[in-house]
Image (cartoon, helix red, strand yellow):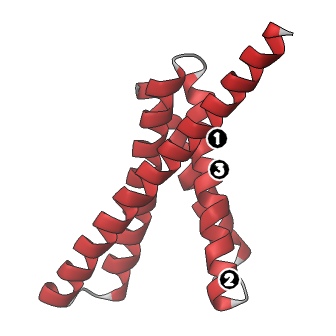
Amino acid sequence: MEKKTNRGRGAEGKAVWILKALLCAYVVTGILLLLLTLLLYKLNLDEGKVTGGIIAIYVISTFVGGFAAGKMAKVRKFAWGLTIGILYFGLLLLISLGVYRTLQGSGANVLTTFLLCAGGGMLGGMIS
């Protein structure tokens, strides 16, 4: 009976630190998007530079989230970082679908974004 209780706490604990890592990634996203907005306003960046900035923000944010998850997990860090990257992408996709009611861009763009998010999270987990 006691083992089930410990498992429940472990699962709750994992869910909590996964949410903490995702929150960390989205806070970094918000800060970096505000910085990119400021740069866009001050420097009149063209579309290519803004797109590159958004891609960099995805990678940096998932890296930070994966790093945080890896620090909290202490085992199989790369897998937890990858999980954070995938969850980040999934939430990003849900938000995009909610706002635009359709996928923005082609399937190749969505796949590339998925790979960048998953790779950034996994790299963050590995380095932690």
Whether label 3 touches label 1, CB < 8 Å:
yes
Residue at 43% over, 35% down: 68
Residue farthest to the top, as pictured: 2
The spot of residue 2 in percent (x, y) is 80, 8
Mark 3 vs mark 1, CA separation in Å: 5 Å
Q: How far apart are marks 2 and 1 (CA)?
A: 22 Å
The image's mark for residue 116 is none
Q: What residue type is labelled 3?
A: Ile
Q: Can you give x and y, in whole percent of width and height, for residue 124 in the image?
A: 44, 36
Residue at mark 3: 86
Quadrant of the image for the N terminus? top right
Per the model, the C-alpha gap separating discs 2 and 3 is 18 Å
Q: Name the residue under label 1.
A: 83
Q: Residue at x 23, y 85 (%)?
A: 40
The amino acid at mark 1 is Thr
Q: Residue furthest left?
A: 42
